[in-house]
Image (tube, helix red, strand yellow):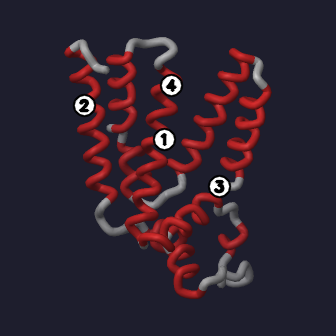
Amino acid sequence: ELRPPGERAAFALLIFVLLMHWLVVLKPEASADGLAMHLAIPANLAANHMMTFEPSRFLWAVMPMGADWSYSIAYLFGGEYAARLLNFAMLLVVEALLYCAVRRWVTPAVGFLILALFATTPMVQLVTGELFVENFVAAMVLGMMTALWRFGEDGDKRFLYVAAVLAGTAMTT
């Protein structure tokens, strides 16, 4: 519940910035990297029902493609916009994990302002507005760091296992 006016204003600013990102996500893909690789793989899987990119013809076919497989699953369910909305969902996960991290040291209003400042950076606009894998990697790395902090506080080994899984997922992406 947001009672103080400062918290309400900071949260409203954060929601405004995230809505602007959502509007950018709804446009068609325009980046060369997104069209040549991150959207080509899901479209190829949807058309051929198998991975047809051969490493002898496409060198990037041997690169880690964890995010591309996630985009492929979303693409099979809803096309290009589903893959782009998955990228936006990863931005929301990054924002939530960042809020959990900064909330240890600041008030909720300042935490919302920090999230809004992070979301207004041009790099966040670039990787969310186009189909890049950076939001996916950032979500995995921040999740790993959050799990490691919880392991350091509680000493519960399940947080260490979660951190190891998220680190491995980030490396395959």
- How far apart are labels 1 and 3 at the CA level? 16 Å
- How far apart are labels 2 and 1 at the CA level? 18 Å
Q: Which residue is mark 2?
A: 13
Q: Which residue is mark 4?
A: 100
Q: Is residue 152 above or below residue 117?
A: above
- How far apart are labels 4 and 2 at the CA level? 18 Å
Q: In the rendered structure, are the residues bearing label 4 and label 2 in contact, judged by CB atoms less than 8 Å apart?
A: no
Q: In the rendered structure, are the residues bearing label 1 and label 3 in contact, judged by CB atoms less than 8 Å apart?
A: no
Give the total of numbered labels.
4
Of the residues under marks 4 and 2, which one precedes in the sequence? 2
Residue 147 % position (x, y): 66, 29
Amino acid on which disc 2 is placed = Leu
The residue at 24%/31% (across/down) is: 13
Of the residues under marks 2 and 1, which one precedes in the sequence? 2
Q: Which residue is mark 3?
A: 173
Quarter of the image where one finds residue 152: top right
